[in-house]
Image: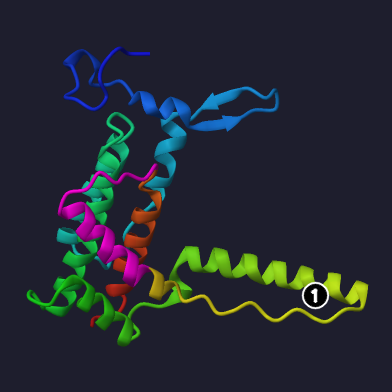
């Protein structure tokens, strides 16, 4: 393991070295041995996150910078919140581009896009994943209740993912932009949500 302070400026001889903190991430193999995450596995979700061809180049370039920051977080772990911030302000750039509104606060633009139904829960992969999982669990519980001849369970409650992101994304965007010690282990969720929001914005102009 390289001998350098990961929180300080990287010595030139270690510029290509992974941040030592990634050694703690990985999986347990069938022999019970910890296998650290590889750069290939780390990079794959970043590489798969893409914007549609309808998105203009100024937004694409901004978002690709966020992806590059996320990729290079392999070398500098603290690039992760910077990548998230850049992903979130890519949304802001897109919102201002499609609306022409240069003055309204980010959250207000976000809320307007939701009010006009430009953004839809059904187009978010996270919403689909959770909703499908809840439906499977519900069906399993119905079968279990029928077998035991007990009261049927109530259907799963509707999950409004838009309500989640309109509260969380502007919050984290401001938190990072104004100086913060917060850091999440991955930028994947920020990149994924941001790409899906931007893609929806350019499907139909506000």
State the residue at coordinates (38%, 57%). 192
Q: Position of residue 140 (x, y in %)?
A: 78, 68
Give the residues in magenta: 165-185
Q: Nearer the viewer, residue 16 or 105?
A: 105
Secondary structure character of the magenta stretch overall: helix
State the residue at coordinates (53%, 68%). 128
Q: Position of residue 22 (x, y in %)?
A: 41, 29
Q: Is residue 84 magenta?
A: no
Colour mode?
Answer: rainbow
Image quarter of the N terminus:
top left
Q: Which residue appears farthest toward the front when viewing the image?
A: 181
Q: Nearer the viewer, residue 140 or 67?
A: 140
Specify whether residue 150 is in view. yes
Image quarter of the C terminus:
bottom left
Q: Is residue 2 above or below residue 157?
A: above
Q: How many marks?
A: 1
Q: Which residue appears farthest toward the left when viewing the image?
A: 103
Q: Position of residue 141 (x, y in %)?
A: 78, 70
Q: Is residue 165 above or below residue 120?
A: above
Q: Nearer the viewer, residue 180 or 63?
A: 180
> Seen in the image, is 24 located left or right of residue 104?
right
Q: Give the quarter of the image for residue 105.
A: bottom left
State the residue at coordinates (44%, 68%). 124
Q: Position of residue 46 (x, y in %)?
A: 37, 46
For label 1, count other residues whose C-alpha is less than 10 Å away and answer few (under 14), some (14-19) or many (20+). Answer: some
Would you name the residue on which mark 1 appears? 142
């Amino acid at each position: 393991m390289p001998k350098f302070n990961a929180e300080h400026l990287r010595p030139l001889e270690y510029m290509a070295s992974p941040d030592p903190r990634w050694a703690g991430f990985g999986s347990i193999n069938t022999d019970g041995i910890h296998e650290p995450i590889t750069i290939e596995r780390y990079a794959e979700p970043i590489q798969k996150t893409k914007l549609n061809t309808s998105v203009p180049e100024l937004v694409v370039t901004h978002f690709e910078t966020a992806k590059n920051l996320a990729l290079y977080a392999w070398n500098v772990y603290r690039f992760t919140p910077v990548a998230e911030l850049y992903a979130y302000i890519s949304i802001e750039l897109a919102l201002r581009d499609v609306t022409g509104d240069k003055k309204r606060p980010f959250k207000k633009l976000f809320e307007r896009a939701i009010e006009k139904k430009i953004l839809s829960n059904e187009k978010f992969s996270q919403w689909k994943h959770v909703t499908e999982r809840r439906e499977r669990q519900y069906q399993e519980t119905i079968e279990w209740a029928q077998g035991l001849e007990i009261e049927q369970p109530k259907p799963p409650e509707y999950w409004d993912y838009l309500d989640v992101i309109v509260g969380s994304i502007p919050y984290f965007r401001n938190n990072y932009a104004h100086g913060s010690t917060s850091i999440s282990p991955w930028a994947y969720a920020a990149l994924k949500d941001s790409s899906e929001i931007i893609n929806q914005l350019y499907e139909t102009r506000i």
